[in-house]
Image (tube, rainbow, N blue to C red):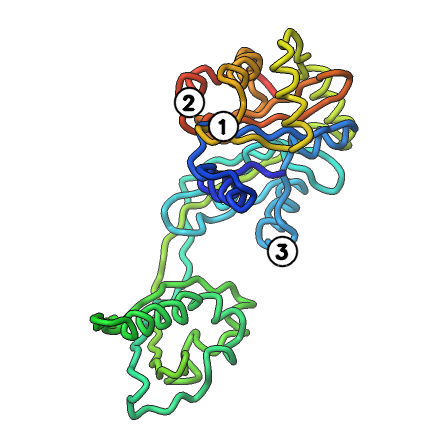
Amino acid sequence: MPSLSRRKLLAGCAVGLTAGLAGCADPDAAMFVEPVSAATDIATKATTTPDSRDTETTELVAETVAGGTNRTSPDGRGNPPYQPDRPVRYNGSVYDIEWQETDRQRDRTEYLISLTVYGDDADRTPEISFDELPAVDRERLHFLPRLIGQIQEANESEGVDAAFPASPERQAWYPPADREASVLVPEPDYETIGVDGHPVTVAVEPTTVSLDVFAYTATERAASLAAFGRDIRATHRFELTGLSDAERDFFAMVIDDGSFYKGSFDDVEDGVFEGVADRFVSQPALFMPYASEGEWLTRYDGTDYWVRIDFVRMSEYADQLRSVEEL
């Protein structure tokens, strides 16, 4: 299970409302427990890899492993394009990937797409519908059908008179392959597109953007996932012992369910979750994706488990979190 942001955590918890977990959408803490019996299971939890559909990041990793590469900030705000929060697995091996900002910049051409939305009674005939646009253009203008739908819905509501925005804009980067597939850039092939019955005119203006350059390097950590998992197990696993009967019953329940959300809605005796949490925060966390969240490898009753706890509203525990000195 990949690490969740707090928003995703709360959203995932909210799904439990349908199972009668009223109030779960605002937990005090959340615990996730997953067995990791094999060394490769441990390594998979302790590493990350680009989504196979993210070809740009996959290529970045491949070039970095092959000898290093340079990449530009994707958004013009000085953010590195890839920031893995743990070692990266690639072609069966495990690598530490590091990056640093250089003193160089690269220019690239982006496109400012300006749109004018007309009412459905406008005297304009669309030359193409939104659904007929190439996927690369629909992706850049994905907000447009939703925007028009929201305004239509508002206008259909009693007492609401919502106007279309004067000229919604979107500045977008089109890599060469996307630019070849596009019918909007570098110049629109169509002046007017149809979106949910509304004509929308399109104007495009190129603009030059200067982007920071980041240098990426890779260092092999382990030749195989199994070797990396064994190393993590040998150096960072701790035994979960000393639990009371109530704490053992609680942890067994979380093992069976896979997760636990703490709050006024749960039926766990006061102090039981805290007793288990005390054992974890007393140990350095392998990873701390967020200030309130830690991940550990523990052994309990002869089985290894990967445990993740987000102390969402329990700052007294979040403040005790600390990372291992060296992974």
The dot on residue 202 is none
The quadrant of the image that shows the C terminus is top right
- Pick whichever, 227 or 302, lies toward us: 302
Q: Going by the image, does 74 lie left or right of 200? A: right
Q: Local crowd at mark 3 within 10 Å, few (<14), some, or many (≥20)?
A: few
- Pick whichever, 122 or 46, lies toward us: 122
Residue at figure coordinates x 62%, y 49% from the top left: 51
Residue 288 shows in the view: no
* Count of numbered circles on the image: 3
Q: Position of residue 316 (x, y in %)?
A: 40, 17
Which amino acid type corresponds to the residue marked 2 in the rendered image? Met
Viewer-nearest of labels 3 and 1?
Answer: 1
Residue 293 shows in the view: yes
Which amino acid type corresponds to the residue marked 3 in the rendered image? Arg
Residue at figure coordinates x 68%, y 42% from the top left: 66
Q: Quadrant of residue 53?
A: bottom right
Residue at which label 3 appears: 53
Which amino acid type corresponds to the residue marked 1 in the rendered image? Lys
The quadrant of the image that shows the N terminus is top right
Q: Local crowd at mark 1 within 10 Å, few (<14), some, or many (≥20)?
A: many
Q: Image height check: is 120 above or below 92?
A: below
- Element type at mark 1: strand
Task: Report how far apart the C-alphas of labels 3 and 1 lie in the structure.
Answer: 35 Å
The tag earlier along the polypeptide, 3 or 2, is 3
Q: Position of residue 59 (x, y in %)?
A: 62, 51
The dot on residue 314 is 2
Residue at which label 1 appears: 262
